[in-house]
Image (tube, rainbow, N blue to C red):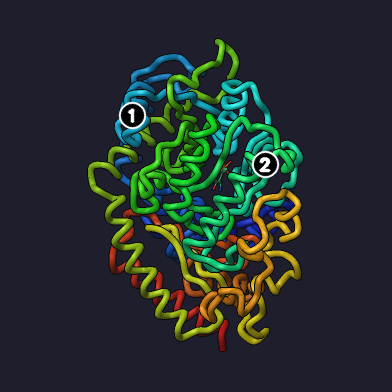
Amino acid sequence: VPESVLRRQTARESAARTCARALPIVPVRARGLTIEGADGRRYLDCLAGAGALALGHNHPVVLEAIRGVLDSGAPLQVLDLATPVKDAFVTELFRTLPPGLAGRARVQFCGPAGTDAVEAALKLVRAATGRTGVLAFTGAYHGMTAGSLEVSGGAGDVRVARLPFPQDYRCPFGVGGERGAELAARWTESVLDDPKSGVPRPAGMILEPVQGEGGVIPAPDAWLRRMRQITADRSIPLIADEVQTGVGRTGAFWAVEHSGITPDVMVLSKAVGGSLPLAVVVYRDDLDVWQPGAHAGTFRGNQLAMAAGTATLAFVRENGLADRAAVLGARMLSRLRGLAEEFPCMGDVRGRGLMIGVEMVDPEAGCGSVGSQEPGRVDGTRAADDFHAVGGVHEGDGNPEAGAGDGIDGAHRPFPVAPALALALQRECLRRGLIVGLGGRHAGVVRLLPPLTITDEQAEAVLDRLADATAAVAA
Ligand code: PMP
């Protein structure tokens, strides 16, 4: 059966299939961290619905919530009518919001996917400000529909200004650390304030507190506070896309809490629906400029997803799973960094909470200058010349193309990213019964997004298998 199912999928589904290519398995049962294939093999699932499964597969509280709705005879599809199920969801959601939004929040239910909520957020800030352009960041991922693609890295649409997202390891300015983040912030300021930049006053700024698909890159807290200040000073609504980082994933209920900032708009999906499709945009009440009918969509009223979401949000809150993610994530990162000492093909190991990435690199290729895998580009972000063309950072502020000797010590000089090695590692993991994701600008980052309910022993088992698989690809 599994072979024929896989064969039919290959024959009938779009060539755009992603996970299915790398993970040729046919899951038929799942519980917690584990999924079982039709061939009886069991896997530890550290992709976990690309982060949608905060409580893992088929958690009892989630199943009970879903059964509760089914057994009650409540309608499953009600557009945006008021129901007790929705009332409970909004009450629980609002209970979790960062202090600056709680008490002043409005929610708009969107379509089933994260990208639907991103579209709604972009539309909302455009309506609220009467402006059109949106500031977005290199390496960002916000979804696959027109508006969200426009603000995702690499899309290069003219209606947005794309700004450098700070990174320590592959800093666009080649300096890393706090100074790299400060340069990125000053770049943003000059794009906004220098008439020569040609960027009109924007309707908003959208960012991920930790870039997920972009390669698990946590934004420095100080930089996030600078972005908050820069946007607040200029009355530009700040949209935090917490589709992947939300619901305890990074070690705080919402990732913006680490920096203490309050965004004007939050985009939420994935874990918010407790493994079922649900997406919402939450925003401060004074931005609620929409007229009746200004935003709609048939599938705004998924009662099963709301019930599953309520159960998940409450379980994470009541059981302190965000704190648990912080502690366990730090422990996993530290063991992974130990592994990276042993295996030079493991480059930067980074993450926040249980959102972890390991960049695979090619040490054989030699220690090049930053971005050596693509001349003139910094890890797939815009060419350094493009940054200068926008008119932001002035001479002496750090050269985005800087190599050795420009303030980068050895530790900051990365080897070229090795996507083939990352893919090989993913395959070796699968052979050992471990499912991991891939991400990053060149798909060179192996990603772990385990359920927040993962036990210490399971986390060790995951890392044991990853270590074995790394030894196999490094051999
Ligand atoms: N924003 C972020 C930060 C995401 O990680 C994703 C999905 N990976 C999306 C938006 C889009 O969500 P969806 O795939 O549900 O449309």
For disc 2, the neighbor class at 10 Å (few under 14, some 14 to 19, many from 20) is few
Label 1 secondary element: loop
For disc 1, the neighbor class at 10 Å (few under 14, some 14 to 19, many from 20) is some
Q: In this view, does 417 lie above or below 85?
A: below
**Drawn side of residue 20 relative to residue 74, left or right:** right
Q: Is residue 382 above or below residue 110?
A: below
Q: Residue 447, percent across and down?
A: 51, 63
Depth check, front residue: 429 or 289: 289
**Drawn side of residue 439 relative to residue 74, left or right:** right
**Drawn side of residue 324 relative to residue 207, left or right:** left
Residue identifier under label 2: 194
Q: Which amino acid lies under the numbered mark 1 shown in the image of this protein?
A: Ala
Q: Residue 343, percent across and down?
A: 50, 84
Q: Which amino acid lies under the numbered mark 2 shown in the image of this protein?
A: Asp
Q: In this view, does 469 lie above or below 246?
A: below
Depth check, front residue: 399 or 384: 399
Q: Which of marks 1 and 2 is in front?
A: 2
Find residue 102 and name its label.
Answer: 1
Q: Residue 74, percent across and down?
A: 39, 20
Find residue 111 and name its label.
Answer: none
Depth check, front residue: 81 or 240: 240
Which residue: 64% across, 21% down? 130
User: Is there CB contact under 8 Å for labels 1 and 2?
Assistant: no
Which residue: 38% across, 54% down? 451
Q: In which quarter of the image is the N terminus?
A: bottom right
Q: For residue 380, which quarter of the picture?
A: bottom right
The answer to whether residue 69 of the structure is visible from this angle is yes
Outermost top residue: 292
Give the mark nearest the N terminus, 1 or 2.
1
Q: In which quarter of the image is ligand 1?
A: top right
Q: For residue 4, which quarter of the picture?
A: bottom right
